[in-house]
Amino acid sequence: MGKLPKLKKDENLLVGLDTSDDAAVYKVSDEVAIIQTLDFFTPVVDDPYLFGQIAAANALSDIYAMGGTAKVAMNIVAFPNCLDSGILGDIMKGGADKVAESDALLIGGHSIQNDVPLYGLSVTGFVHPEKIQKNYGAKEGDILIITKQIGTGLVSTAAKVDMASKIAVDEAVKVMTTLNRKPKEVMDAFPVHACTDITGFGLLGHSIEMAEPSGVSFEIFADKIPYVTDARDLAEMGMIPAGAYKNKEYFGSKVDVTGVKEVFADLLFDPQTSGGLMYAVEAKYGDDIIKALRESGLATKVAVIGQVVPKKEKLIYVR
C-alpha cells in the first residue's frame, strides 16, 4: 500500500489513504457519504457455511466501524476446481445469510479459479458526512470500550491441532459470526471520539493505530479485558499464531508490557478475525454505554478496558 501513488486532491474524499482507517469515505451530498470497503481471506474454520458467515461479518464490520449502515455487497470468490462445488455453495450461503442479517443487499460478485479457497465481500454503506467515526481523535481522559472478547486467533490455531475445547471453539465462532451492527446502533446515541474494529493487528496493534494519530497514549488494563474461554491457557501453552509474533515484532517497540506477565502480550497481539469494535468516548458516558450494549441483546462480552492519557514515551502501556 505504501507504494500506491498519492491521490489527487478531492474535497469530497473525507477518508482516504492518509490514515489507517477501516474504509474509504466519499461525500456525495450534504446528507450522504459513501463508505467503501472490501475484505476476503482463506478459511479459518472447517465448516464452509460458518466460514462464509465469518468472512461476511468481517467485511461488514468496516462499515460499522466508520459509523455507517451497510447497503449493498458483492461476493469476492476464489475456489479450486478440484473441490466439490457444494462447498462453495455453502460458503456463499453463509455469506448471504449474514448480509441479509445486516439488512444490506447482496447484488452479485466475481469468482476465479484458485489453488485455495478465498471468500469475502466488497461492501458499500452510507453515513452522514458529519457523523463519520474515524480511527483517530481519542482525547485525554477518554475511556476505551470493546464489544467482543479477545482470543479467536489462539483458539482457531489450537483447533487446527485438536487442542481447543468445544466450549472455546463454539465461543470463538460466536464471536466471529456476530455482526458489529448492534454496537454501532447503540453508539449512535453517544458522542464517539474514535473507533476501529479489532482484527489482524490484534488489540495492541489497532490501539497503536488509534493512539498515534490522536497524539495520545493508552493505558490498557489486562485484567479488565474479556477473553474467549481457554484463550489464556492456550497462550501459556504456546499455541500462538504466527500473526501474533509478526504483530509483536512490528509494533512491539511502541508498547510497554513490563507491568504484566508475558502471556498478556501474546493475548493482546493475537490477530483477531471479525473482532469487536473499540471506542474512545468521554468517561462520563461509560456506565450508560455498557448498560445499553448489554441490554441490546449483543451475544458477545463488552467492557471498559483502558483509558486515554497524555502522550508518553510509549504509545501503549499494559497494566
Image: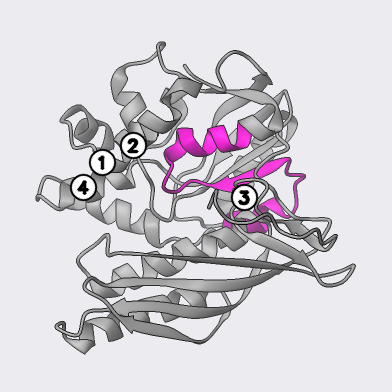
Q: Quadrant of residue 116?
A: bottom left
Q: Are marks 2 and 1 in contact (CB under 8 Å)?
A: yes
**Which mark is in front, 3 or 4?**
3
Tell me the residue that label 2 is attached to. 246
Which numbered circle lies on residue 242?
Answer: 1
Disc 2 from disc 1: Cα separation? 6 Å
- In the displayed structure, would residue 152 be above or below residue 38? above
Which numbered circle lies on residue 157?
Answer: 4
Disc 3 from disc 1: Cα separation? 24 Å
Disc 3 from disc 2: Cα separation? 20 Å
Element type at mark 1: helix
Element type at mark 4: helix
Residue 184 in magenta stretch: yes
- In the displayed structure, would residue 66 be above or below residue 227? below
Nearest to N terminus: mark 3 or mark 4: 3
For image coordinates 32% across by 47% down, the residue present is: 152
For image coordinates 55% across by 48% down, the residue present is: 2
Disc 4 from disc 1: Cα separation? 9 Å
The residue type indicated by label 3 comes to Asp
Element type at mark 2: helix
Q: Nearer the viewer, residue 169 or 195?
A: 195
The residue type indicated by label 1 comes to Ala
The magenta-colored residue range is 182-211
Q: Quadrant of residue 202?
A: top left
Residue 200 in magenta stretch: yes
- In the displayed structure, would residue 9 be above or below residue 49? above
- In the displayed structure, would residue 138 be above or below residue 70? above
Tell me the residue that label 3 is attached to. 21
The percent coordinates of residue 157 (x first, y second) are 21, 47
